């Protein structure tokens, strides 16, 4: 008998001799075989054993093979069913195929062909099971907001998150756009005592300057033209939980002053009202700006910075933690394969290209690249040709004299390349880089590209 366990198969047939012969052949082929002389005898087995496939006679006394198929289609739709039928019931077998049966054979079957079909059926069942497990795992990981990486800086971040997740102290998360600052904020919120409380995220860079104050603090009916009803602001919505201000460096000085007063007094006033409303929340902020430099330029309040920066977490860009790239690629590959119902691997050539790229858009850009590759790939392997042109066109980043480029030079080249591809369209360039239009203008100014 074959030593390899290829799967567990149930054979249902009312003819004892046929049952015995078929069980022996499939057992020799390496399957764990269980048998039943009727559908009534077979049904209890499904409560005890997770079968990989079922081979059943079509016509039997009592419940028929079609009856069994109907029950399995309802209760165990992922178990493939193979029919054995006489010439007189071929029409029924064809009908079963249209309803989702895996295959049918005329008795006596070609046993070599039957083994091949059974092998395909069992493999399909296992793939479905693996995809189901991937989807379940993906859902669990989204709930946990798990941080991925073995880089020393990432391990340090994980230690800080673990230390302060239950604290009320303000946390400031610093790092380039796309490095995963919001993921860290959600991890801080979801990993401890705050998990059952509200988590309210505000992207300060995405809200127009004239609307940010009403968005944060709310307003009363009639407070301004168009204010047709009372609106509760984001700060008030976060009461009792966490307020996450993403890209807080984009706030105007006037709004900074009001936010500072809220943090000091733990009270807000909606626009158009003199009523003070008590609010208690934990504040987590993030920024891609150098706030001490912004303070020197008079663009950010120093007193607010001290309020925000009780605990600081600095997230390294992806180009400085290349050892984590294979881990991140594997994680995103599993995520999108589960979503798309595919089983793919990444070629060595494609991985080498990914490791040589500078990743100006950091983890967000990498995630988008893997998603695109999974969606576009038709075969079993993601090759280099599936990667975007901007990645294929950039090497590891060497200049003519083989000097390694500085981070500023790499960023300069990346921004200039994207602008060229967008024909100077700054909105499109900002979208491709994963940053706000306002942040792009600042980058252009800092890099001498304005």
Image (cartoon, rainbow, N blue to C red):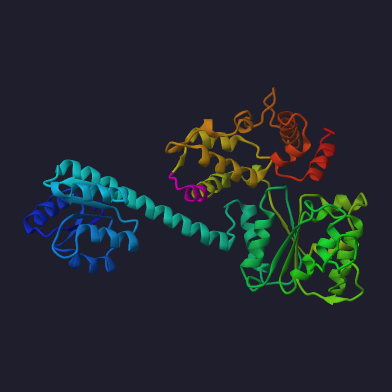
Q: Is residue 344 above or below residue 156?
A: above
Q: Is residue 340 magenta?
A: yes
Q: Is residue 44 left or right of residue 228?
A: left
Q: Is residue 311 visible?
A: yes
Q: Position of residue 168 (x, y in %)?
A: 73, 72
Left or right, 383 with reference to 418: left
Q: Residue at x 84, y 58 (%)?
A: 212
Residue 80 on image: x %, y % = 29, 53
Q: What secondary structure characterizes most of the magenta part?
A: helix
Residue shown at 76% from the left, 37% from the top: 408
Query: Is any atom of residue 10 visible in this view?
Result: no
Above-or-below relation of 423 to 61 = above
Taking the spot 43% from the left edge, 36% from the top edge, the residue there is: 379
Spot occupied by residue 449 in the image (x, y as percentages of width and height):
82, 32
User: Which quadrant is home to the C terminus?
Assistant: top right
- Viewer-nearest residue: 302 or 372: 372
Specify whether residue 185 is painted magenta: no
Which is nearer the eye, 232 or 50?
232
Q: How many marks?
A: 0
Q: Quadrant of residue 166?
A: bottom right
State the extent of the magenta-drawn residues as a range. Answer: 335-343
- Seen from the viewer's position, the closer of residues 333 and 152 is 333
The quadrant in which residue 228 appears is: bottom right
């Amino acid at each position: 008998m074959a030593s390899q366990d290829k799967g567990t198969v149930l054979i249902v047939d009312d003819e004892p001799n046929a049952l015995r012969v078929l069980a022996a052949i499939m057992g020799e082929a390496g399957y764990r075989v269980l048998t039943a002389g009727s559908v009534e005898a077979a049904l209890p087995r499904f409560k005890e054993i997770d079968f990989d496939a079922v081979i059943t006679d079509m016509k039997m006394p009592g419940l028929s093979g079609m009856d069994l198929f109907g029950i399995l289609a309802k209760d165990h739709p992922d178990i493939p069913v193979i029919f054995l039928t006489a010439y007189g019931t071929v029409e029924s077998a064809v009908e079963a195929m249209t309803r989702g049966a895996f295959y049918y054979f005329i008795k006596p079957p070609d046993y070599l062909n039957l083994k091949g079909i059974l092998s395909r059926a069992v493999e399909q069942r296992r793939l479905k099971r693996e995809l189901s497990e991937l989807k379940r795992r993906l859902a669990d990981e989204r709930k946990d907001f798990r941080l991925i990486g073995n880089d020393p800086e990432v391990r340090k971040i994980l230690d800080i998150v673990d230390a302060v997740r239950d604290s009320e102290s303000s946390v400031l998360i610093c790092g380039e756009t796309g490095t995963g600052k919001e993921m860290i904020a959600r991890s801080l919120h979801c990993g401890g005592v705050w998990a059952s409380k509200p988590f309210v995220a505000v992207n300060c860079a995405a809200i127009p300057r004239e609307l940010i104050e009403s968005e944060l603090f709310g307003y009363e009916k009639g407070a301004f033209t168009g204010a047709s009803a009372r609106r509760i602001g984001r700060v008030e919505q976060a009461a009792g939980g966490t307020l996450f201000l993403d890209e807080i460096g984009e706030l105007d000085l006037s709004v900074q002053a009001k936010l500072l007063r809220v943090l000091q007094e733990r009270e807000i006033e909606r626009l158009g009202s003199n009523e003070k409303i008590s609010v208690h929340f934990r504040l987590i902020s993030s920024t891609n700006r150098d706030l001490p430099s912004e303070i020197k330029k008079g663009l950010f309040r120093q007193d607010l910075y001290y309020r925000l920066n009780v605990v600081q977490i600095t997230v390294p860009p992806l180009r400085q933690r290349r050892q984590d790239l294979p881990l991140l690629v594997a994680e995103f590959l599993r995520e999108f394969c589960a979503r798309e119902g595919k089983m793919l691997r990444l070629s060595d050539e494609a991985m080498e290209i990914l490791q040589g790229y500078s990743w100006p858009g950091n983890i967000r850009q990498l995630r988008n690249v893997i998603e695109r590759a999974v969606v576009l790939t038709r075969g079993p392997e993601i090759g280099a040709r599936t990667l975007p042109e901007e990645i294929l066109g950039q090497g590891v980043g060497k200049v003519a004299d083989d000097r390694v480029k500085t981070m500023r030079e790499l960023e300069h080249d990346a921004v200039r390349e994207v602008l060229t591809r967008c024909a100077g369209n700054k909105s499109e360039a900002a979208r491709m880089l994963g940053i706000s239009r306002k942040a792009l203008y600042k980058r252009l100014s800092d890099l001498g590209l304005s």
